[in-house]
Image (tube, coloured by chain):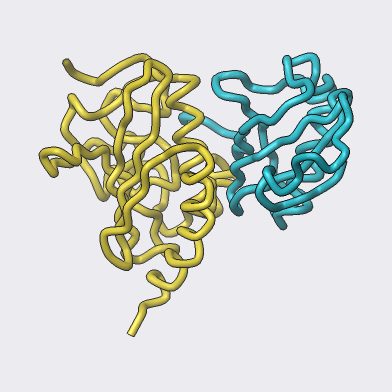
Amino acid sequence: MSQDNKSPDENSGKGHKDDDVVLEIATPNGVFRGTFDKNDKVETVIKEVVKDRDLAEGDAFELHYGEVHLEPVNRPLVSFGLKKGRYKLTLVATGSGV
Amino acid sequence: MSTPAALLVKVELYALKENASLMGWSIEQIDDLTFVLGLPAKDGLTYHLRVRCDGYPATPPAWHWFNPATGRIDNRPDTPRGGNFLHGNGVICAPWNRLAYKTVDSRGPHSDWQIGAWQNNAYTRACRTLGAMALRIACELMKSYEGRLAA
């Protein structure tokens, strides 16, 4: 993973590989931007984003792509259709109605 | 002079505005303690919330469903429904919403929660900032949403 918390346009043409997935993720602590391999697992992405955005590592988060909840987290990004390209995701604290 | 609540809202709105810009949400700050947030639902409709943060974080924000055209809050046609979260009483049912407490709002489903202990409520989990709360609502408008509360 290469973390590059800046405009993805700034990263264009910098030798991204065919397996690169550029993610822009809205998180509780603002936007994370970074590049992952399409075969990276969802849990790897969550771990990196939590660390980068200074979120509490003991808290539980889910990664969503539109209506799709990316679970189970041991599956690779590509298994959810995230392959070479740029995507906007959300990192959401777990929990729902009670 | 800014209050502690206003200072915290200012800090947390920075992250929320960044997210809104990325996701195409609308956000407008009304005053130091109030903002309006527009979020899309899975049927393409946009729902607005007028959020009042006086007393935050000692007490949680009040997340009112809102109609920016009429200025009305808590109007059933402007309120989404779906699951326990988008509660049939017309309020977001979560410890981090002031309106979920019956002691505050008669529609509040919970008389068993202590509002002053909202951050320690087990159901709050990591929804302890305005950014985290907004992301949860946005998620539920995609996941649990079933339509308007009233036609």
Furthest residue in direction bottom, as rendered: B1
Looking at the image, which residue is at 14% across and 38% down? B69
Q: In the figure, is residue A22 to the left or right of A14?
A: left
Which is more toward the observer, B78 or B96?
B78
Quarter placement of the N terminus of chain A = top right
**Residue A42 sits in quarter:** top right
Q: Quadrant of residue B34?
A: bottom left
- Chain coloured yellow in this rendering: B
- Residue B127 x, y percent position in the rendering: 54, 46
Q: Which residue is located at x 51 percent, y 50 percent? A: B131
Q: Nearer the viewer, residue B140 or B60?
A: B140
**Residue A88: image x %, image y %?**
61, 33
Q: Residue furthest left?
A: B70
Q: How many marks?
A: 0
Compared to residue B124, the image places residue A20 above or below, namely above
Q: Quadrant of residue B94?
A: top left
Q: Is residue B63 left or right of residue B25?
A: left
Decide: is A73 above or below B98. Answer: above
Is residue A54 in view from this perspective?
Answer: yes
* Nearer the observer, B121 or B87: B87
Residue at 28% over, 47% down = B50
Q: Is residue A39 left or right of residue B32?
A: right
Is residue A56 visible from the viewing direction of this image?
A: no
Which color has been applied to chain A in this rendered view?
A: cyan
Q: Residue at x 37, y 43 (%)?
A: B26
Residue B10 horizontal/vertical position (percent): 44, 67
Residue B21 at x, y = what percent? 48, 46
